[in-house]
Image (tube, helix red, strand yellow):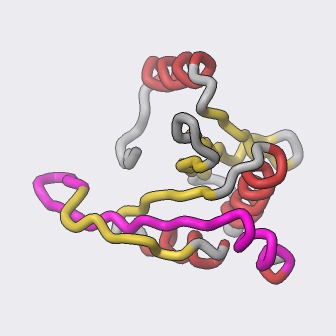
Amino acid sequence: MFTRQEISQSEHQAWFTGLQRDPLRCALLYEEDGLPLGVITLRRLQGMSVAEWGFYRDPGAPKGTGFPMGVLALDHAFKFLGLHKVYGEVIGSNVASIGFHRRLGFLQEGLLRDHFETNGCYEDVLCFGILAEEWKSMREQKL
């Protein structure tokens, strides 16, 4: 999901309620010194060991917070959940997120042309993925 507008309290509550009822989704809260700085969600595809991830970093979080969040989430996905693959989609204009995925070792697997509309303009969406074996072989190099 691509969201640029502020999310209301009722929208947050509906999201949490749906999360609790859905056995295919999990949310990982990232904290430093007891302060919540972000959330990563993993949504497993029905009957598969593949999951889509979603990522939210608090705008006030210290610079560089996203990388350790990503490392811990991928460790959880592959070691604890036993997933084979994690994938995500990124709006083409989100240069920071594209770099983030590449830095973690994700490969671009596809391009959805003019896939996302905002304010009457269409943007491409890039599809990224990483396999458990790829993460295992490159994890130590990333740290």
Left or right: 73, with 24 as reference point = right
Image quadrant for the C terminus? bottom right
- Indicate the position of residue 58 as horizontal and vertical percent values: 61, 49
- Image height of 98 relative to 51, above or below: below
> Total of numbered circles in the picture?
0
- Indicate the position of residue 14 as horizontal and vertical percent values: 48, 18
Image quadrant for the N terminus? top left
Please report the bounds of the magenta region as a residue range.
Answer: 116-140
- In the figure, residue 84 lies in which quadrant? bottom right
- Indicate the position of residue 23 as horizontal and vertical percent values: 63, 24
Name the residue: 21% across, 53% down: 118
- The question of residue 1 being in magenta is answered with no
Q: Spot the residue most to the front.
A: 47
Name the residue: 38% across, 68% down: 126
Q: Spot the residue most to the bottom.
A: 141
- In the figure, residue 136 lies in which quadrant? bottom right
Left or right: 32, with 77 as reference point = right
Please indicate, yes or no, whether residue 65 appears anywhere in the rendered image.
no
Name the residue: 43% across, 23% down: 11
- Indicate the position of residue 31 as horizontal and vertical percent values: 79, 45
- In the figure, residue 8 lies in which quadrant? top left
Left or right: 108, with 130 as reference point = left
Along the line of sight, which residue is nearer the eye, 116 or 65?
116
